[in-house]
Image (cartoon, rainbow, N blue to C red):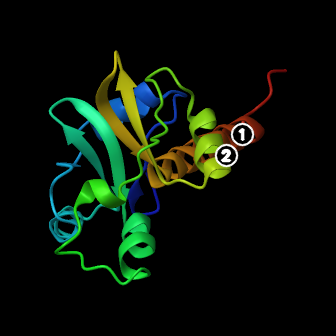
Amino acid sequence: MVLGNVETPPMRGTVADLLAYKGSHVHTVAPDATVFDAIQMMDARRVGALLVMQEDRLLGILSERDYTRKVILRGRASRDTRVDEIMTRDVITVQPDTSLGECLQLVTDRGIRHLPVTADDKVIGLVSIGDLVRAVVAQQAETITSLKSYIGSDYPT
């Protein structure tokens, strides 16, 4: 569906549906990388967070928010600080069968912007608050179109 000039994902209800639309690629960084290198990676990939991984194991998440609060505001040097020193360790994850409504509730209640998707303790994707909002907008646009069609249709006599 195209809304305005922006293609929006179909809203079918689960994280698996959203990943099927947007893809499951995740951007990662090693725990021993410097924060400077991680921020450069975020900039190059135009993302606001990186999953901190060691091989296939999720160790944490590093966001722009972590950087501003734990490096800049504390006067630390990003070239001398390792990712594992400032990453968020208690990562909230979701499963592929988690509803998009549940995801929206999580990001709202917890004040987070990214949800790694895991299955069998392996990371299989990442959804952001932006992904979720686009899906809701698409669902609402489809509902409006359906209602307009229903209201404007001829009634059988």
Taking the view exactly as shown, the residue that stands out farthest to the right is: 157
Residue at disc 1, secondary structure: helix
Task: Categorize mark 2 by other alpha carbons within 10 Å: few (<14), some (14-19), many (20+).
Answer: few
Residue at position x 22%, y 40% in the image: 53
Query: Would residue 1 be visible to someone looking at this image?
Result: no
Task: Categorize mark 1 by other alpha carbons within 10 Å: few (<14), some (14-19), many (20+).
Answer: few
Q: Residue 147 carries which label?
A: 1
Q: Residue 144 carries which label?
A: 2
Q: In which quarter of the image is residue 106?
A: top right
- What is the x, y in percent for residue 66? 41, 64
Query: Would residue 6 be visible to someone looking at this image?
Result: yes
Front residue of 150/93: it is 93
- What is the x, y in percent for residue 110? 62, 49
Which three-letter amino acid code belongs to the residue tagged 2? Ile
Residue at position x 24%, y 64% in the image: 42
Q: In which quarter of the image is residue 120?
A: top left
Q: In which quarter of the image is residue 23?
A: top left
Residue at disc 2, secondary structure: helix
Q: Relative to residue 136, is residue 72 depicted above or below?
A: below
Cα–Cα gap, marks 2 and 1? 5 Å
Q: Is residue 77 left or right of residue 73?
A: left
The image quadrant where one finds the C terminus is: top right
Circles 2 and 1: CB distance less than 8 Å? Answer: yes
Front residue of 115/97: it is 115
Which three-letter amino acid code belongs to the residue tagged 1? Leu
Number of numbered discs: 2
- What is the x, y in percent for residue 132? 51, 46
Residue at position x 51%, y 44% in the image: 135
Q: Is residue 56 left or right of residue 142?
A: left
